[in-house]
Amino acid sequence: MSIDLSQFHQIFFEESFEGLDVMESQLLELQPQEVDAESVNTIFRAAHSIKGGAGTFGFMQVSEFTHVLETLLDEIRSGTRTMQRSYIDLFLQSVDCLRAMLSSIQAGSEPDMERAATLKGSFENILQGTSAADSAEQDLPSDTGNTTTADVTESGWRIIFNPSEDILQTGNEPFRMLRELQELVGADYLTVIPVTDNLPEFTSLTPENCYLSWILEIRSNVSRDDIASVFEWVADDCHIDYQPLCAAPLKNTHDDTPEIRTGAEQKSAAERENGIPPAEIDSGRTATLIPEKISEALEIAAAQKSKPSVSARTARSSEPSSIRVSIDKVDSLINMVGELVITQSMLGELGQDFDMSRLIRLQEGLTQLEQNTRELQESVMKIRMMPISFAFSRFPRLVRDLGSQLGKQVNLVMLGENTELDKTVMEKIGDPLVHLVRNSLDHGLETTEQRLASGKSAEGTITLNAYHQGGNIVIEVKDDGAGLNEERILHKARQKGLVPETQELSSEEIHQLIFLPGFSTADVVSDISGRGVGMDVVRRNIAELNGNIEVKSVRGKGSTFIIRLPLTLAILDGQLVKVKNETYIFPLVSIVESIQLQKRSLNHVTGSQYVMKLRDEYIPIIRLDEFFNLRSNDEEFENPMLVVVEGDNEKVGIVVDDLLGQQQVVIKSLEQNYQRVAGISGATILGDGTVALIIDVSDVGKNLEKSGKGQSRSEQAA
Amino acid sequence: MTDNAMIECGERLSIEHVEMLYANAEQALATAGDITLIADRVQYCDTAGLQLLLTLQKTLEKTGHKIHWQSASDTVREVSAYLGLTDALNLSD
C-alpha cells in the first residue's frame, strides 16, 4: 500500500517557511566574533529539517541545495570552521533563495535554479577552501596538530555510533546505515565493533528497543561530511562522535566485546595482519591514546543509553509545532463551552417544569447565558489574535539589507511585539508597514555624513512600536532622521498643481500631502522608493482595514507615522443612528464628532448641496436619507444630528435623524450574501433581530464627489 | 542428557515479529540447555531480531550453554555481518 505524500505537502511548506524564518532571525542575531553555539545549532536544525522533508517529498532541488549550506553549518557548529560575516551574508541569501524555490514549488512551477546554482557554487568554493573571501577572512589555526577535526583526515575516522533506544521503532534501521557506510568507504576499510554492554538480561529485554551501539573504524580519507550524510536522518536521535584516527587500528578494550568484522573484511583484515597494512600503524600510540578516548566516549554513550528514551521525545516535543493557536486559548474556549453547557442544562431543567415562582431563577439563568455567550465570543475572537511580532519579524532583515544598500547605519528597535491583533488585519498591514519602513530608511534617515554634520550619532534609529489603545491597535513607525521638509513638499505639490499657489496650508495639512496619489519628493527614483506610488496606497490599504494613518514630523528630529487599526475585522465598534425608520451603523473609529446641526451654520452651495463651517474649515454635508433615497427632495431637516466622519483624510458631515447607542456588532458581508451596495461596507443583525447596514464612510464621500455634489475644500473656502 | 530446544525463525526475523520470537525463546530457555536455531527460511532480518538472539546467546553463556545454528539464510549472515555480530552470534562457523 502506498501513501499519498502530497497530502503532507502543505504542512511541509508551512514548516519549511517557519524554519526559514527561524534561520533568518538567528542569522541576523549572529555576531561573527561571538558565535552562540545554540544559535548555530538552531539554524542547522532548521536547515536539516528542510533538507530532510524536501528529500522525503521528492523536492530534490531544495534538498540538494540545502545540503551544501548544511555542510558549512555543520563545520561551523563542530568548530572546524569559524563563522564569518561573509558566511552570514551567504546564508541569508540562501534563505531567500530557498524561500523562492519553495514558493515556486508550492505554486506548481519550476524553481529558479540559476540563483541556487550560483549560491551553491559559492558554498562549494568555501567548503573546498578556494573562496577568496574565505581565505582572506578565515582565521585558521596555525597548528592543527593532533587535535584536528578537519573534514578529511589522512588516516580516517573512529565513530561512536550510539542510537537512541527507540530508533528501531521509528523505522531507522542501523544495519542499513552500516551497509551504506560500507558502500561509501569500501568493505576493506570499515571495521564494525558492536558494543553489547547495555544488553539487559533476557527477562528484562524489551525486544523493540535498541540496546546496541557501535564503534566504527574507517581507514579511508573519506570526508566527515560524507560519513555524516549516512546518519543524517538519525542525527537528532543518536549520539555520534567523530574522532580523527591517528593511524592506529582499533583494539577492542571491552573484554566481552569481540572484534568483529564483516565477511569481506575478515579476509582483508587477515591480509592486512599478514603484512598488507592499508595504513600506517602505530600500536604504541594506540595503547596510550585511543582506549582513554574510547572509554570516555563509551561512558557517555552508556550513560545516554541508560536514560529513558522519553527524554529524546520530550526534547523534540518542546520545539514549536505547527499549531498556530496557543493551547491556553483553546483551553479557555473549552472552559467557556463547558460553562455554556451547564447554563443550557440549567435552563433546560427550568423549562421542563416552569411556573412563575421560578421566574427569578429563569432571569438569573438568562443573565448567566448572556455572560457565557459574551465570554465565549471573546475567547473565539482571541483565537484569531496573533502577536504582531509575526508582522515585525521581517524587518530586521529588511533594515539590514536596505541599510547596507544605502550605506546607512541603522538600529532597529521593536517594541510591543507581543501586542495581539487579528490574523487578517496582520496579513493586510504587512505591506503598508514595509513601505513605511523602507520610506523611513530611504527618505527619513540621513546618510552617515549628514548625520554627523548635524551633530547626530552616525547610526540612525527606526523604532517600530505597537500597543493597544481604546479598543484599537496603534502601530508607530518612527525615525530620528531629517523629518519632513515642508517647504519642499509644498513646492512639489504646487508644481504638480495639487495645491493652488495662493493657498496657505498648516504644517499638518502639508504633511498630509504626502498621502496624495502620485506625490513624491524623491530626486532619485530607486527600487526602494521615489516612484510616487506608495503612500497613497498605504493610506488606502489602512482605510480598507477601517483604520487611519497620521504623520507627525519635526524638521531635523524625525518623523512618526501612526497607524490606528481595529483589533479585528469581524467585530466593529459601532455608533447606531436612526434615519427615517432605518438603523445604520457608523464605525466608531471614523467618527470625529457628533453635533446638533444648526441650520444657520449651513451654507447653500448649489441645488440641494450644503457646506458647513466647522471651526476653521468647510465640510460638505450629506443627508443620509437622501443618499439612500429614503425621502422626497423637498423634505426639510427637522432637528437633525450631524455626524462628522473622516474617510480618506477628508471630513464629511452626515446628517441623520437621531443618534442611538454604541455597541459592538458582528460584521456580515453584504457582497457574499447579497451584492455590493454603494456606501455600505457590510451588515449586522441587531439584538432585536433586525438587520442594520454599516456605513462605508470613504465610499459615501467618493460617491458624493462622483455625483458632483461634493466640492473641494479649496473651492469651498474660496 | 537434555534435549536441545529448537526455535524456528520463520521468514522474517524482524521487529514486527520479535514479540512472538521472544515468547518462543523464553520457552526454549526454560529447557535449560543449548538452543538450536533454524533460520534458513529467513528472507528479512533486522537489528531487533538479531539483538534478541544475541541477548539469548549471552543469557545462555552464563549457564554454559550457547545457541547453535542448524541453518541460517544468506540474509541472516549478511545483516549480522553489517552489524558486526557474526562472531557474537556464533555465525562464523
Image (tube, rainbow, N blue to C red):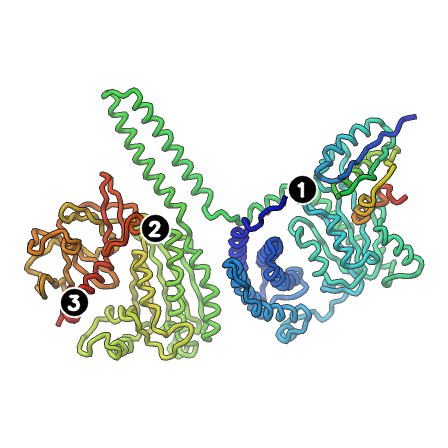
Q: Which residue is mark 3?
A: A711
In which chain is the residue bearing label 3? A
Mark 3 Cα within 10 Å, few/some/many (few <14, many 20+)?
some
Relative to A458, say whether A364 is above or below: above
Quadrant where the C terminus of chain A sits is bottom left
Amino acid of disc 2: Thr
Q: Which residue is mark 2?
A: A568
Q: Position of residue A198 (x, y in %)?
A: 76, 41
Gap between marks 1 and 2 measured at Cα: 46 Å
Query: Which one is nearer the viewer's eye here, A6 or A307?
Result: A6
Q: Mark 2 or mark 3, which is nearer the start of the sequence?
A: 2
Query: Which one is nearer the viewer's eye here, A363 or A582?
Result: A582
Question: Is circle 3 on the same chain as circle 2?
Answer: yes
Q: Mark 2 or mark 1, which is nearer the start of the sequence?
A: 1
Gap between marks 3 and 1 measured at Cα: 76 Å
Q: Which residue is mark 1?
A: A169
Question: Which circle, 3 or 1, is nearer the viewer?
Answer: 3
**What secondary structure is marked by label 3?**
loop
Amino acid of disc 1: Gln
In which chain is the residue bearing label 1? A
Query: Which one is nearer the viewer's eye here, A531 or A157?
Result: A531
Q: Position of residue A323 (x, y in %)?
A: 49, 47
Q: Position of residue A79 (x, y in %)?
A: 66, 62
Residue drawn at (42%, 79%) of the image: A449
